[in-house]
Image (cartoon, rainbow, N blue to C red):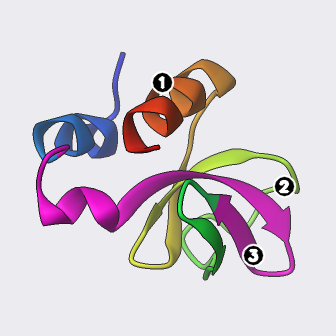
Amino acid sequence: MLSDTMKRMEIADKSLFAKYVVPAEYLGEGIALTPYGRRKVNIDFLPNVGVGQHVIVHYNYVVEGIDGKQFEELRVKKA
């Protein structure tokens, strides 16, 4: 089942909003790897995020953890 964040991403996929809500892999020390490159992120909303975890980044905030399948589906759409 898709989360609310992911549903909004699908709806907004062709809009400017889609560039600001992206799948990423958390690399640690406040850095995430997105389809657009490395991005400095804030983990206040998901403080227990682990290195290598797939997440949703919204305006440089890690807001939600996602599984590998969801990550691949979203990453392919964005790339």
Q: CA–CA distance between discs 1 and 2?
A: 21 Å
Q: Residue at x 83, y 63 (%)?
A: 27
Look at the numbered discs 1 and 2 and tell me whether their residues touch, using CB distance below 8 Å.
Answer: no
Residue 14 in the image, given as x and y percentages of width and height? 13, 46
Marks 3 and 2, the one that precedes in the sequence: 3
Position of residue 47 relative to residue 9, above or below, is below
Q: Tell me if residue 20 is in the magenta stretch.
A: yes
35 vs 4: above or below: below
**Mark 1 to mark 3: distance in Å?**
21 Å
Q: Between tags 1 and 2, which lies in front?
A: 1
Tag 2 residue: 50
Location of residue 37 in the rendering, given as x and y in whole percent from the top left corner: 63, 67
Circle 2 crowding by C-alpha within 10 Å: few under 14, some 14–19, many from 20:
some
Q: Which residue is mark 3?
A: 31
User: What residue span does the magenta drawing correspond to?
Assistant: 13-33
User: Quick one: quadrant of the N terminus?
Assistant: top left
Mark 3: which amino acid?
Ile
Query: How many C-alpha atoms fall within 10 Å of the one at disc 3: few (<14), some, or many (≥20)?
Result: some
